[in-house]
Image (cartoon, grey):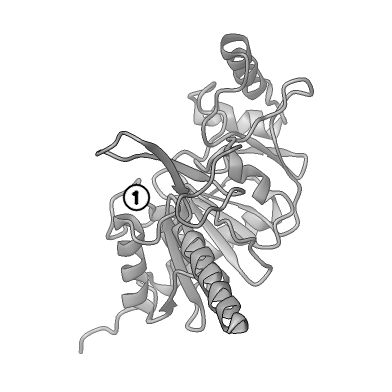
Amino acid sequence: MKNKPHFALLDEGSKKEIRRAILKAVAIPGYQVPFASREMPIARGWGTGGLQITLSIIGKEDVLKVIDQGADESVNAVNIKKLVNRTTGVETTTETGDATIIQSRHRIPEVPLTENQVLVLQVPIPEPLRWVEPSEWKTKQLHAENEYSGAWLMLFEQIMKYGKTATNADHPVLVHDRYVMAPSPIPRFDNTKMDHSESLILLGAGREKKIYAVPPYTKVTSLAFEDYAMEVESFEGKHCHLCHSTDVFLDELVNPETDETYYQCNDTSYCLATLNEKALKAEVAIEHAK
């Protein structure tokens, strides 16, 4: 008799082990919990950590959204969504507000998340001290001793060299006034969305075999000096050429025919929703004018 395939691909023992790691991560905000990362039908480095978290927590009633650098239609996002859908049968969506689980690579959605949602972030390098200390044993000791002078020194050297911190993404954050954490390679623009977020944020690194978390309503602050505050990406004076939004993270694009620079919402579903909302308002205004 042929064995019945497991719900959500992973066997129940594997899912229980990952859930235990998640519970420990939630109990100790920002702490990297080791786990036995499984072999997945996608290459390591393409979201295996986030995928294992999603497959371990997803239920039949959940609604899944997957994005890759703000886009729902990228190859990585589409294939992960297909894999989860085929092994669970759960509903998928591109609407942030409709999703109960959102798995993302390198972005946090523009729409504020709620306490009924879980954000799963894919992480390539979970250790924020890796750039200053190559030894895994040593970084564990530094975290245990609350010794983060290396991280501060890295930021100080950037200021001395460039006049400001030069972290384009994955700017380290301090969680619950205790652990320095790598927020995954999200832009600095998204760091503030982690602070006191209503949703649970889970971060998974499959290749590095680490899971860590930011529980709801947890204090998260970006590392910065008092006289050199961390500056987020500025889009002052710029707007999305499609929906004309100005308070979102924008991609800089170039028209190959005219060499003209223009900007567009990085979060594609947010842009489409804004366009639809404006179109609906225009229709209502026309009806009232008749």
Which quadrant of the rendered structure holds the N terminus? bottom left
Which quadrant of the rendered structure holds the C terminus? bottom right
Task: Where is residue 233? Give x, y as percent.
Answer: 58, 35
Which residue is most to the left?
1
At x 49% / y 70%, what residue is drawn? 276
Q: Amino acid at mark 1?
A: Trp
Q: Name above or below for residue 149 compared with residue 39.
A: above
User: Which residue has dot 1 on it?
Assistant: 46
At x 75% / y 39%, what residue is drawn? 178
Q: Tell which of 147 and 263 is nearer to you.
A: 263
The quarter of the picture where residue 143 lies is: top right
The answer to whether residue 37 is visible is no
The answer to whether residue 10 is visible is yes
Q: Name above or below for residue 64 compared with residue 178.
A: below
Quick check: 1 left or right of 143?
left
SS type, badge 1: loop
